[in-house]
Image (cartoon, grey):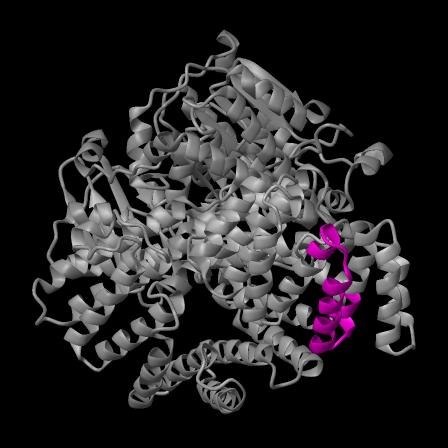
Amino acid sequence: MKALVPLLLFCLPFFGQAQNAPQQIYEELLESEEELSPIVDRYLSLASSAPNYDSYADSVYQFLEAEAPAKLTIFYLEQMIDRAQAGKEKYYWQNSLAYYAIEQEQWDMAKSLLSTALAECPKTDPYYAKFYYTWACYLYYSGDYKRAKKALEQSLLQLESKEDKSKIYNLLGAIAYQNDALSDAEHYFLEGLALLQADSLLDEESESTFLNNLAQLYKDMGALSKALSFHAQVMAIDEAFYGKEHYYYAMDLDFLAGIQALDGQLKLAKENEEKALAIISASLGKQHSLYFELKANYGAILSSLGEIEAAVANYEELLREEKKVVGPSLEYAVSLNNTAVAYFKMGKRKKAMQYMQEALALRKGKMAKNQLGLLQNQYSIARLHYYNEDYELAKEGFWEVIQANAKDENWLAPEELLEADYWHPAFFVQSLEALSQLYRDNGQLENGLDSAALYLDLALDYNRKIRQELRHEADKQRTLSLGQRLLNRQFQLQLLRKQPAASLFQLAEEQKAVLFQEEQQLGAWGLQLPDSILDQRAALEEEFMALKQQRARSLESSEKQALDAQIAQQELAITAFEKTVKQQFSDYFAQQLETAGLDVGALQQQLAEEELLLAYFWSEEGLYAFALSSEKLQLYELEQEGLAEDCLALQKEMQAFTSLLNDAEGSRERYLKLALSVSEQLLWPILAEQKGQRLTLVLDGPMSYLPFEALLSREVALSTPYAEIPYLIKDWEVSYQSSAKLYLEQSRRPLYPYNKVLAFAGSYAAGGEKAQALRSPLLENRRSVLGPLPAAQKEVAYLEALFDGRFLYEQEASELNFKRHQQEGYGLLHLALHGVLEKRQPFLSSLVFTETADSTEDNFLEAWELGRLQVNSNLLVLSACETGTGEYQSGEGLLSLARAFQFAGSSSIVASLWQVNDQSTAYIMQRFYSHLQEGANKPMALRLAKLDYLNGIGEPSLGHPAYWAAFIQLGDPRPIPLAKKGRWADYWPYALGGLLALSIPMGLFRRRKEKAA
């Protein structure tokens, strides 16, 4: 990737109207076979007599810069200064030569020219501001950032055109970046880009510069998704302008490899870095500085892959070549440090320390104390002291790094660390983690465990602060992964410190569903902000998600590329807007993101007398469970070995309809073997000591995919028939929560004041030619594999016979009708529809309504759309396939359609964990509603419905959990009021004769599986 670009071709110092230069002039110059001197002389003469002097002059300058040796270019530019008329023409060439001297690092010449020009040019002349800007460029490139910033700010007041101002903002952004003021850099880059976009002044070259700078910036900020979004545009521009053999494209590949390495995609990173090295070698040679830079990056990737010997060989070769070409430079110091890290991984610590100290000696005095390279060098030496058990030296080193990273010049005490600002926030968190580890492992340091816990607390708090400033969920998830590691370590520390179970419970809950809670806190940015701001943000977000949806559905690479550009531009607009609003309402946003820990005592008071809440905490160091009742809290350490594999295998076995149909006996034994193993590790040690009837579960890790109702309450033989299997559901009512804190908050909220039912029964016949013309091929393909749901019609017909409300079938069961009618207020929503799970892009998971050839809605209600709705229901039943499952993310649980509906406002949800049989679903749903209308709470109603099913089936193999265990209840368990349709509702079994037949034919299920759910 190109380094941060303060000035590119579009940033040349105000060469008049360069965009209007006669193109044929430049082309003739390039095509001419004459000697350089006569042709340049001729065109210089032509420029002197032409009315559009600047245009001709620009063409000559560009030709010289591209084709002539530096010495000859300087000669011609000096000649033009002598030949030019006083005033504008002379100023033009003075400015041109000064800028060329800057490019050639001839600092004395540049300084002399600019000093003379600024002294001769009247301050009222427009060229004075241009000279002053070039003077700022000189200061920047010569490393005097402080004076450069001051000069640029002065130029900003003097220059009037938006194009000129955008160049200044770009350079101000580059200065802020060099000073590690990343937020300021982002502000300047966005301002400069916005100025060009406002008047359609943005060409591909200038766009590439700004996007390149933003991509590099966001990479350093840890916002990798944003960085990739902008970088994709840079690659497209560079490929179109320069081709795939140009060194610019190699630098793009290098940047991409860096992002992939940070994201753990090391094999892809290695492939792209090798391609980049091959391009640089062919285009610039192996002694070019860019080749050295990329070879160093290649070594880092090899090291991360564990190919240590190859990494060391790569670095040693690089050191030999760099020493010949560049000598003891900063670049050489980087290679020394990288080589040291590789030697450390080989176990050669003495050699590693030698190289690190040599690198540090080169960097000190040449780098500011807060620059990341210097800090990392010092940090690495401190880590080496730690591994060598030189704990005092390690402690001094870590503290030195933390203090140098702080923007406050004063020495910070431990209690002041959290309030300070840091040049490199993520590195600050890393330093705190290292300091904590040092105190934990060295018993001789004062207050060892207490200090270790303190520094981990600070690291967790600051990591949270970083996360809350990010926009992309993928970027936030990366900070959650780091947070989970810190949390695991803190949990182990608190165990060593013998902290009470309530404190440990609070800690374990800290990251459960945290992104969901933060989204809920911010919501639509709340009611305290002006409506105009809320409306504007909603419109920007709507357009952004619509573009992402369109891109995901596109099949053409050219269309995807065009959409990538639109997505990047829309994201820029959102980022700039949010930055402005958050500065304007800073107190409000700070208040919204304040977090309080779980109040264990308050939660305990909310639990029913017969209720047991089990909250699991899965970490690399161990598995723990908190058992909370209204009387006590108890912590259990559980056996973890082999459990992750067994949980995933059991989940797979519960869904294995094919093996169930073809090998019923073997399927039952495989299920029982896995269920016994999982139950023994997760449940039996706890239930042996706990009493109750209601089990509320907060799951974590691989167990999150399992319905606990289908686990076992005691040991049985593998030959046990289904009717005698001691399923947990036979003894316990089971419900699920995303986190204990959310459960407490939910229990305190009143029910919505609605009691009617809104129900949809979808139809999946082909949409016809009109629908095909409206829908993308991708959507058409998705719909074509969805089979009919005949039992869905019966489900809704049953509800219509029993309850008051609105019941929509077939063509009326459309997305448009759902969005329209759900706003009317219904206590219960029942959606008997297909669900489509998108594990790679959860925001595109969808409920599929009937195809109505509607031009405004495509009848795929996607998860991202739900975030824009207010679905205020007391219960939502998703009688569809895989609506409760999704991709598991550490700290967030399953990213499913059920989660999206929770965010939209539904306080309780019944959803499925896998593809379900619509015959057994119809029966269980009918019994569920029967018990619900009799006053049972939601999890009890679902439990009784499943027991009715198990007690009534005639075919033994239908007792397999695949048929009945998929549906779970998530959220508020309380009973809800439902409006009955009248006195005849009590006679629904007779009115709907046949619906309760329990002998569900196996043949029906076979036909059902012929089409994908």
Asked if residue 71 lies in the magenta stretch, the reply is: yes
- The residue most toward the top is 983
Query: As displayed, is residue 459 above or below residue 945?
Result: below
Viewer-closest of 825 and 717 = 825
Q: Which residues are magenta?
A: 62-91
**Residue 45: image location, x then y, percent:** 87, 63
Q: Is residue 183 left or right of residue 200?
A: left
**Residue 706: image location, x then y, percent:** 42, 50
Whether residue 638 is visible, yes or no, is: no
Viewer-closest of 236 and 610 = 236
Query: As displayed, is residue 849 above or below residue 347?
Result: above
Q: Is residue 290 left or right of residue 80?
A: left
Viewer-closest of 250 and 546 = 250
Write the residue at 74% across / 47% down.
778
Asked if residue 127 lies in the magenta stretch, the reply is: no
Q: Is residue 602 left or right of residue 712?
A: left
